[in-house]
Image (tube, rainbow, N blue to C red):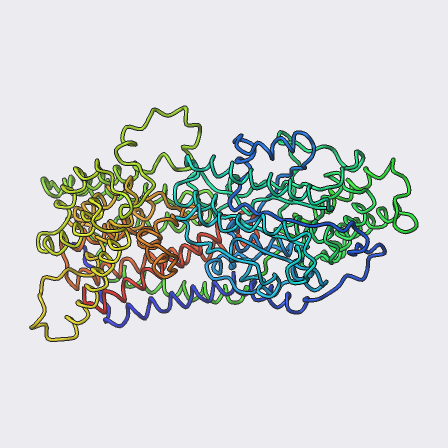
Amino acid sequence: RVPRMHHPPWLTPLILLCLSLSTALYGYGFLLADLQRNNAAGKEGSGGKETHSDCPLSSSSIPRRRNVLMVIDAWKWGFLTEFEDMEYVRSSIDSGSAAVLRARVQTPTVTMPRIKALTSGSVPSFASVLLNFHSTATVEESWPRAVKESGRSLVFYGDDTWLNLFPDVFEKRSEGVVSFYVTDYTQVDDNVTRHIDAEFSLNEIKDQESKAADVLIIHYLGLDHIGHSLGGESEKIPGKLKEMDGIVRRIHEALINSGDSFLFTILGDHGMTKAGNHGGSSSDETQVPVVVYRSEKGEEEGGSRTNLSVPLTIEQLDVASFLSHELGVEVPSDSLGVTYHHRIGFDVSLSIIAIMRDVRRLSEKVPDGERKDSLISCVHSLSSLLGANCILRDRKEWRETVERCYEQAREVQNSLISSASQMDGVSMIIAIGGTSGIVLYLLHSFLSSSSIDNLSPSSFLSLPIHLLSFFASSLVEEEHDVWYFLLSSSLFVELFRSLRKGEKGRSLFAPLSSLLLHRMAISLTMEKRRRWNIGENLFPPPILTDLFYAKDTIIDFIPSSLWSILVPLLFISIPDRYSRSLIAAVFAPLIARAHGYCTPQTAACIVWATFLGGMVWRVAERMTERWWLPSSLPSPLFLSIPLLLSISRPHLLPLLPISYLMGKQLAKCRDSFGLTATALSAAFFYTGGGNSLATVDIAVGYAGLSEYQEWIVGAQIVLNAYAPCLCVLAGFLSESDSSKVVHDLCKEWMLRRAVSLLGCQLSLFIFRSHLFVWSVFAPRFLFEAVHLTVTVLMTACWWITGR
């Protein structure tokens, strides 16, 4: 084996602590500092009013109408244009009774930041994605709060994120549904729909506490949950789209029958990928429909008729401005939205007033210069179109002026969106300096502890190439290819070294078999990668689809065809000294579940009890003299195998024994530590994951659960993401499970993590104004922070249990 660094025992946790502090400081400077500024701005600006408009658009100057906003979670543009299941909506657009626009969504494409964008018109900080699972009351200005302060009523049904963000805004009869229990896509929508008829029957009630709401907001989650649990191409999606289409028709007809003036807006908060996830920046995730019904007939000169084939494009931020004007409240001061009244046929005078106010607000957000002067000139031009009482003077020449000012406002808006986030450069530089010092120390120790002939080829190949790859956005997006190349190349180098030294048999078999297993692992998800999305008709039919593929998790559904493969693979992969306890732990709940003798919840309890009980047992074994405890109990790493099996997707199940066997073979190579460290990095991508939030499999977190339990859900999501990595590590340690081996591998891995963190910090700082900073570099930093956190937890577990 290659000799490695030797440090005192306390140095490993100290280095990990320093790396964690560096990551936290950098995260504060890049993400959280901007979030705090947004909150402070919200508090300072709360309640602010615009006083500069010569033609105020107050609630008394627009038609009194009932407003309904319907949000369909994960309703992407393709669900309206490529599917014919929403017949009523499509026919309404074709007939001109509804207008349609295509809205662009900024990253991150997750629900809570999107709700903030829809209600405030501002660009949410990327740090808000960290709060998506635990949203709290927002302090930013928003049109729902402004409507409430104006004395009107708002009622909400649906995703409880709205109630968390606006706890004192909605009427008492409002009701939320749990947004994170993604395996429920039926009841979660039924609990919203059951309120519709009752809500519209309140029109005749005069009682102040139960009268019909001035603003009704409903947020449906079923489509999003189908995507997470069954995939973005599930056969359940057409049926859900038909259900949503029926609800749109039901609400629209109820509004027409009421005889009141109304505005009914239907939109998606974000889209979804073909895999059913979201959070990234692909077109499927960032393009959503906005459909507008209203009681008044559109003016012919007010705007051209919209259609699905050549849609008008807006920013999702514009919805906040549009609704604020329609509701007669002040547009939130932080809003970057530009209204689109004139493009969908609204009253010309009101359209000019609305866009004039938006242009003037944007002019106050840009520094003095040519852009500011052009916006001020537009305000004067728009104002000159209006005569006494803010009524249009000449209906013949207004369109050219409005379109010119609208396009200028859009240019300024795009510039403000790209520069919306602020960073604390000092904190970022200090963090980079700290990480650089750690990297230099580890490199010095690494080089000084080994002779030239014994240096790890894998490390010297991987470290510089991976560091340089951070400065190319395409390589960051496709980082799996970098690690696949590095692992394959390192194994070839290991093979050539063995041949040069005249070694045969076991020395040649280990790298060759590792290459074969690596290739088998990446082939299971290779067709899902972006480069292969060139048209399904170009590929031959998959051979193993019927055998392996199923969207369910093992604990909920075990295909019988898998058992003939699962049993021998488990017997091969499990070490002999652990066979009895592990086989009992794996097969007891899974076989019972497969034959219907227990519920998924019972099976999950057994698996978790095995894992946690083993952890407690190992700690007790370490803290006592062990005379009353069995000495052959597996370590927590091996005890996690049943848990990994229980939450894994059936079609990805072969990854676990493949990864395990690869770890066993890597342990027999000359450069075992360097190759294993490289394999751990590559194995993270075996399940199809990447550096995009959209690649995180959310549904596996709910395996065996009947309700949302955030800690268990989070733990199972993380365990599933790192399952191949844990299996590689388990296979490696099954060959040489000693404290010295673990200690040396930990040093190798710390060097990899430190260099990776440094590359991530440097690239993010250098490209902080890059076009892809929020879609590529920022998500990569979040994943790097998670990698480091998992490393810290694994090290702590090893230190506490001793194995």
Please say if 648 is above or below 125.
above
- What residue lies at 80% left-to-right and 47% top-to-bottom? 350
Depth check, front residue: 680 or 655: 655
Please say if 699 is above or below 616.
above
> For the image shown, how many numbered marks are present on the structure?
0
Residue 565 picture location, percent across and down:
18, 38
Does the image show residue 309? yes
- What residue lies at 39% left-to-right and 45% top-to-bottom? 229
Say which quarter of the image contains residue 346: top right
Depth check, front residue: 333 or 468: 333
Say which quarter of the image contains residue 712: bottom left
| Quadrant containing the N terminus in the rendered view | bottom left
User: Position of 241 compared to 420: left or right?
Assistant: left
User: Position of 363 compared to 100: left or right?
Assistant: right
Does the image show residue 455? no
Which residue ends up furthest to the bottom in the rendered image? Answer: 624
- What residue lies at 13% left-to-right and 53% top-to-bottom? 584
Depth check, front residue: 424 or 93: 93
Residue 574 picture location, percent across and down:
14, 50
Which residue ends up furthest to the left in the rendered image? Answer: 627
